[in-house]
Image (cartoon, coloured by chain):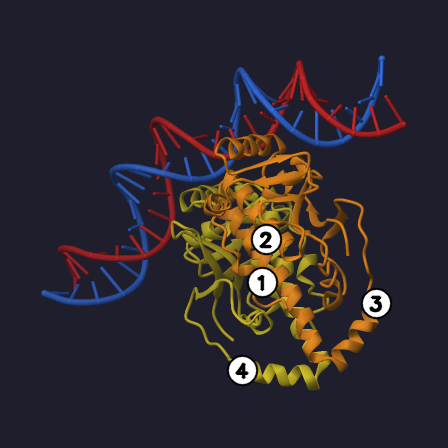
Chain colours: A yellow, B orange, C blue, D red
Amino acid sequence: MEGFMCRYMDDQKGDRQLVAVHVAGDFVDLHGFPLGYLDHDLATLTACQVAQVPHAALDGLMVTRPNLTKLLWFSTLLDAAMHREWIFRLGRLDAIARVSHFICEIETKLRAVGRSDGSSFHLPMTQADLGETCGITAVHMNRMLRELKDRQLMTIRRNQVDIINPAGLAELGEFDPSYLFLDNTG
Amino acid sequence: MEGFMCRYMDDQKGDRQLVAVHVAGDFVDLHGFPLGYLDHDLATLTACQVAQVPHAALDGLMVTRPNLTKLLWFSTLLDAAMHREWIFRLGRLDAIARVSHFICEIETKLRAVGRSDGSSFHLPMTQADLGETCGITAVHMNRMLRELKDRQLMTIRRNQVDIINPAGLAELGEFDPSYLFLDNTG
DNA sequence: CGGAGGTTTGACGTCCCTCAAGGTAGGTGG
DNA sequence: CCACCTACCTTGAGGGACGTCAAACCTCCG
């Protein structure tokens, strides 16, 4: 309902890799319903307010409300589409483009729920968190953020993101929001 | 029904990033049903035999067969779980571990459909394909495969994979098959 | 026999990591 | 109100993993 959460997985050394970041309005744990258990971990990035839905209630919905079921299914496949985009980001983009891409994605998601005006928004993630998102170290994340500032594309200061040149940022991050299916979320 | 397919996305330079590899038995394009359209591309790696299911038939199933619907939903979330594992692989593992992890994953999937005996199987992917899967160049993939052979872990020759030391390969790739939910696929 | 696609190898460059040190801001207790 | 602590941010130097470029080779097939 409120706050920021993330999904992550740990490697053998205990280092985290974030696999998703969730904002207010997301149905976070729906994957656990058809799967039975969850293959990864959840954590909050801020204090959060969450609503819970018993699996039994979802089973009931599946029988009585196929259209609503399809919407829930849709929302989990939206997560899958974002996962694919993250794979692309980690596999094909260099560090600075990864950061740009992620910032564009989170801005788009926040704007969809009225948490961003298109240029400025609150993002409660440390540079270490951002590094674990983009598959780079916190030190290198710091250098990339400096470079984004130097290039007049965006700044982050005290969890506050300011996008100076949205088009330039999207271009650098090869960001195309069609995978977020904003024309279809109702 | 038969053959190998993959899902992929292109970057601005036209280089591919594979985001999934599908084997015989997978329901490949089910994501397009709730989503409405597909945010990525599909290609075959070999000649394939495919079965098609009209979306209208799936709509019918959702009304009359909620249990079967949940199974289909499950199968798409399995894809999502694999996507997460690919994110982890690209974000946290170095090149040789990425290859090991992928080989372990595809071996496990093939074994589940009787296409691998646990040590040997057919994998119709070039070193360039494997590179596009693991986010490294074909040249570096070649070096990693040589190293895996030198370390007595596995060999690939003419699309034939031979795993010499399965435990060692899984260890190197930090591979844990629980995300494949093999205890739950019926 | 020749060509195309795939594999292998070497030399060299660069992006990012590692390690280390210092700086900054907010929070807590004296 | 100051002292201190902790978490986070910033910067530098040096090294290593992987990319790039180029050439040779191998294998299949027409």
x and y, in percent, of residue A170 in the image: 63, 49
Distance CA(mark 3)–CA(mark 2): 30 Å
Mark 1: which secondary structure? loop
Dots 3 and 1 on the same chain:
yes
Host chain of mark 1: B
The label shown at residue B182 is 1
At label 1, which amino acid type do we have? Leu
Contact, CB < 8 Å: mark 2 with mark 4?
no
Host chain of mark 4: A
Mark 4: which secondary structure? loop
The answer to which quarter of the image holds residue B38 is bottom right
Along the viewing direction, whichever of A91 and B61 lies nearer the viewer = B61
Distance CA(mark 4)–CA(mark 3): 32 Å
The label shown at residue A54 is 4
The label shown at residue B108 is 2
Along the viewing direction, whichever of C7 and A40 lies nearer the viewer = C7
Q: Is residue A86 above or below residue C28?
A: above
Along the viewing direction, whichever of A89 and B54 lies nearer the viewer = B54
Contact, CB < 8 Å: mark 2 with mark 1?
yes
Identify the residue position indicated by label 3 in the image.
B54
At label 2, which amino acid type do we have? Thr
At label 3, which amino acid type do we have? Pro
Q: Nearer the observer, disc 1 or disc 4?
A: 1
The answer, for residue B41, to whether it is visible in the render is yes
